Amino acid sequence: MRGHERAALLLGAVGGPKWDNPNASVRPEQALFALRTRFGLFANLRPVTVLPELVEASPLKASRLEGVDMLVVRELTGGLYFGRPSGEETTSSGRRAVDTLPYHEDEIRRIAVIAFELARKRRKRVASIDKANVLSTSRLWRKVVTEVGADYPDVVLEHRLVDSTAMLLATWPATFDVIVTENLFGDILSDEAAVLAGSLGMLPSASLGDRRTASGTFGLYEPIHGSAPDIAGKDIANPMATILSAVMMLRYIGERQAADRIDKALSQVLAEKRDVTVDLGGDAGTRRMTDAIVARLKTN
């Protein structure tokens, strides 16, 4: 923090079996949603790259992974997760549940602007993902993204349906540069894309909004994997996604030198392959891999 102002939030994965009851009134995810709402964090950035050292850990053939370097930009504060009405009721004919999928053009426009701005710094391609052949919200999404795209003539825009996109992510993922999509689709597609990197334990994320601090754009940083309660306390979890989330945070608040040092330490450990977790093809535990990263960091 600088000047006693919060520059960022670093969050660990939340969840667990004791909250799996569908009738539970309190869930850990509610706190995460509240943080996003409180700080106006409407854009979730999930980078997906395949490191050469981890090609063998991916379920796809090496030839399919060549050139994979994508960024999923997911809208965070609209859609099914926040729509009202939402709930379950008992009717004369049985139980009935409803969820509502709303989007306002302003919500779509601001996430589209972020996607196009980021694409300008990358390979200048945006794929907007929707279900416009079925959903009214998707048709509005497509219209607004097209309008925003007109302001970025140097960026190539394509519209894709979510189902065909899911297939393409599993067959030719290098097709994508920047993907922008709504909340639910982004949640599902980014988890699918995470497998390309060889493990869900490899990928970080950043949730950003319009708020600015002395350090830059305020954000919340977290690994995209869940809390994995089935392996809690077993010393086998991959620490990479959490560490890489911290690296993203350092870059966004202007601490690039520190981020580069950690990145270098991570690359060294991955290249040597002696101290990596089971999901990455090694036999190290969480502590051993973390200690190895810290050791390399001290010598960099």
Image (cartoon, rainbow, N blue to C red):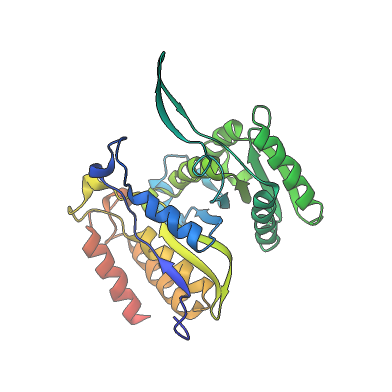
Query: Which sits in the foreground, 297 or 96?
Result: 96
Answer with left or right where residue 253 lies relative to residue 30: right
Seen from this angle, which residue lies furthest top?
A: 93
Residue 285, by quadrant, is bottom left
Return the x and y of residue 24 as percentages of the image width and height: 29, 40
Answer with left or right where residue 94 lies relative to residue 211: left
Q: Is residue 74 above or below residue 93?
A: below
Q: Is residue 92 above or below residue 87?
A: above
Seen from this angle, which residue lies furthest front?
A: 92
Answer with left or right where residue 30 lies relative to residue 123: left
Q: Is residue 63 visible?
A: no
Q: Is residue 290 visible?
A: yes
Return the x and y of residue 275 as percentages of the image width and height: 27, 61
Which residue is painted at 54% across and 61% down in the image? 40
Query: Which sits in the foreground, 271 or 265?
Result: 265
Q: In the rendered image, which quarter contains the C terminus?
A: bottom left
Query: Which sits in the foreground, 247 or 97?
Result: 97
Seen from this angle, which residue lies furthest bottom?
A: 3
Query: Which sits in the foreground, 261 or 6?
Result: 6
Return the x and y of residue 129 as percentages of the image width and height: 63, 40
Numbered disc total = 0
Residue 265, by quadrant, is bottom left
Which residue is painted at 32% across and 60% down in the image? 239
Residue 241, by quadrant, is bottom left
Return the x and y of residue 20 as percentages of the image width and height: 28, 39
Q: In the rendered image, which quarter contains the N terminus?
A: bottom left
